[in-house]
Amino acid sequence: MNNIVLIGLPGSGKTTLGWELARRLGRPFVDTDEWITRSAGTTVERLFAGYGEPFFRRVEAEAIGRAVGVESAVIATGGGAVLDADNRQALRNNGLVLFLDRPPAAIAADIEIAHRPLLKAGVERLYALDKSRRQLYKTCAHVVTDNSGPPRETLAALEMAALTWKATGFAVIGDPIGHSLSPRLHAAAFAAQGRAETYTAIHVPRGRLGEFVQAARQSGLRGFNATIPHKQDLLPLLDEVDREAALCGAVNTVTLRNGQLRGYNTDMEGLAMALQAAGTGYRDRRVVLLGTGGAATGIACKAALDGAAHLTVLGRRPEQAAAIRTALAEWSECEVSIGDMSSSSLTAAASRADLLINATPMGMQGIPDEFPTLSFVAALPAHALVCDLIYNPPCTALLREAAKRGLSTVNGLPMLMHQGLLAQQHFLDAALDLQRLYPAVEAAVKSTLTQEKGEAV
């Protein structure tokens, strides 16, 4: 069975959210309390009053037994469904169990207690139920869903958990994720190898990463990639992290084997391979890095590991640039300078650069931010290479300005393709012929970008 089961305190939203979730997923909806009232011809309140709680629990167990037999249903249970061990086992054995964790104070503000048999004693009873049942809810649930915020946020999290649980093969997660080229990239690479693998995009809202990981452990996923904003937040949720990913503090590739999650960072090596293909690298180079996020941190680590002569990190928040310098100083002797993104700082750093890398979103399609001025490009030495991690658009304002001045340039597409192929090696636990696969991946990605550009016009 592949039911979606909602458990939680009375008034935690199981019926309301469950009905809407079923509608979104195109599944039948079952409310066990509603089944009981229809079968008994009276309300739950009257059943409690006339026959007592033990009788009601027996009737409830029968309803749960019938409910889990409904194929692919979304099931909303009563608040006390978890009290019976047989109920808990039946629910877990026949679907994904989600605990709607709503604080008692929020429930008290939402519901009319007079219509809740167990809450007639007042709000204090709600807190007592939470204290006595919380561990049972958590033990029974595959995923604990935070339901303290607006219903739309909880619904997005429930839908994410359901889609993750059904997923097989591989995936990419992010927020947003609709723009990702990873599904097309990996499909092309799998096809070129003659492998019938699946790779999907899953929207994981910011702040819901822990719930995704819980669902992923129960799913058929064998691995996933992560993009903004999850690369750094994944680290404490994994069972193992490889050395380079741990050093840079960011993960973009995760494998799932025997319930264990291991994290890697293929962005670092992917960019290094892209730079090598463009005729340069980090060793003995003076590198100027724009940005202080997860991607920038990984690049800074790789530049230090590969022997950069000097690294300058410029960011809008100098304290984050300082954090990168401090982290590198713990294990690297690479000389690191930091600064802000003012025109004077950019110009001074550019004048001494062999390699300038933009790891900010400035210039990305759909992002309103852009460099206030590109005058610093004029200060770059004639031999310098300008790299922009952005691949959509393929030629940003920064790259156009650099090319206009006769400088070598490279955008983010080669990095994207190299890191994707490196990720597949981890997913498949196999050495791949990357040179042979690269043309197939490149053709698929460029075709997608061309189609998107045509649709935009």
Image: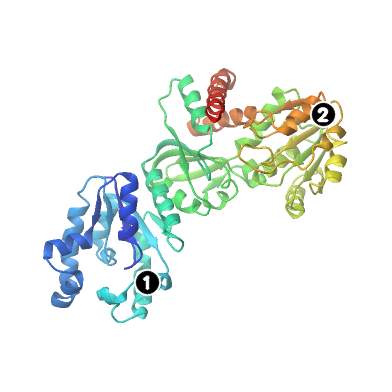
Up the image or down, 237 lies above or below 106; here it is: above
Residue shown at the point (45%, 49%) measured from the top left: 212
- Residue type, numbered disc 1: Asp
- Residue type, numbered disc 2: Ala
Up the image or down, 380 lies above or below 46; here it is: above
Secondary structure under the numbered disc 1 in the rendered image: helix
Q: Judge left or right: residue 248 versus residue 407.
A: left
Residue at the bottom extreme? 121
Q: Residues within 10 Å of mark 2 (few under 14, many from 20)?
A: many
Q: Are marks 1 and 2 in contact (CB under 8 Å)?
A: no
Label annotation for residue 130 = 1
Q: Residues within 10 Å of mark 1 (few under 14, many from 20)?
A: some
Up the image or down, 91 lies above or below 307; here it is: below
Q: On the image, numbered disc 2 is attached to which residue? A: 384
For marks 1 and 2, give the one nearer the viewer. 2
Residue shown at the point (12%, 61%) measured from the top left: 39
